[in-house]
Amino acid sequence: MVAAAKKVLEAFEALPQPARQEVLDEILCRAALEHHGLPTDGELVAAADGLFLQLDRDEERRLLE
């Protein structure tokens, strides 16, 4: 993460809760209006792999309990 993004997050975390919610609402509205390209097949496969690996780890942890 770039330094500027870290500063934004630190400033966000320093806000009182009502202000945080306002900022979050505005960011989500703006994000909804941004152009987002569709993920590539490789990105979808990588996301699925990560998900299934996590599910496998969770299941193994439950079996060991």
Image (cartoon, rainbow, N blue to C red):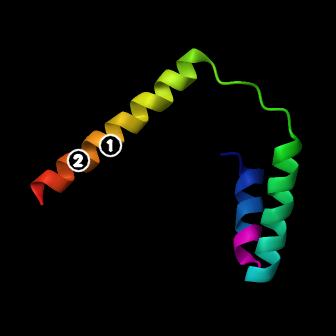
For label 2, the SS is helix
Query: Could you say which is closer to the camera, residue 29 or residue 14?
Result: 29
Q: Which residue is mark 1?
A: 55
Which is the main secondary structure of the residues drawn in magenta?
Answer: helix
In the depicted structure, whether residue 15 falls above or below residue 55: below
In the depicted structure, whether residue 44 falls above or below residue 24: above
Q: Which residues are magenta?
A: 11-16
| Place of residue 15 in the rendered image (x, y in percent of width and height, measured from the top left) | 77, 78
- The image quadrant of residue 27 is bottom right
For label 1, the SS is helix
Along the horizontal axis of the image, is 32 left or right of 3? right
* Amino acid on which the number 2 mark rests in the picture: Glu
- The image quadrant of residue 10 is bottom right
Work out which residue is located at the far left of the displayed protein and give it: 64
Work out which residue is located at the far top of the displayed protein and give it: 41
Q: Which residue is mark 2?
A: 59
* Amino acid on which the number 1 mark rests in the picture: Leu
Along the horizontal axis of the image, is 35 left or right of 49? right
Q: Residue at x 82, y 77 (%)?
A: 19
Along the horizontal axis of the image, is 40 left or right of 23? left
Tell me the number on the disc at residue 40: none
Q: Residue at x 82, y 47 (%)?
A: 31
User: Do the CB atoms of the residues marked 2 and 1 lie less than 8 Å apart?
Assistant: yes
| Place of residue 20 in the rendered image (x, y in percent of width and height, measured from the top left) | 77, 73
- The image quadrant of residue 8 is bottom right
Magenta region includes residue 60: no
Real-space CA distance between mark 2 and mark 1, rounded to the nearest whole angstrom: 6 Å
| Place of residue 49 in the rendered image (x, y in percent of width and height, measured from the top left) | 40, 29
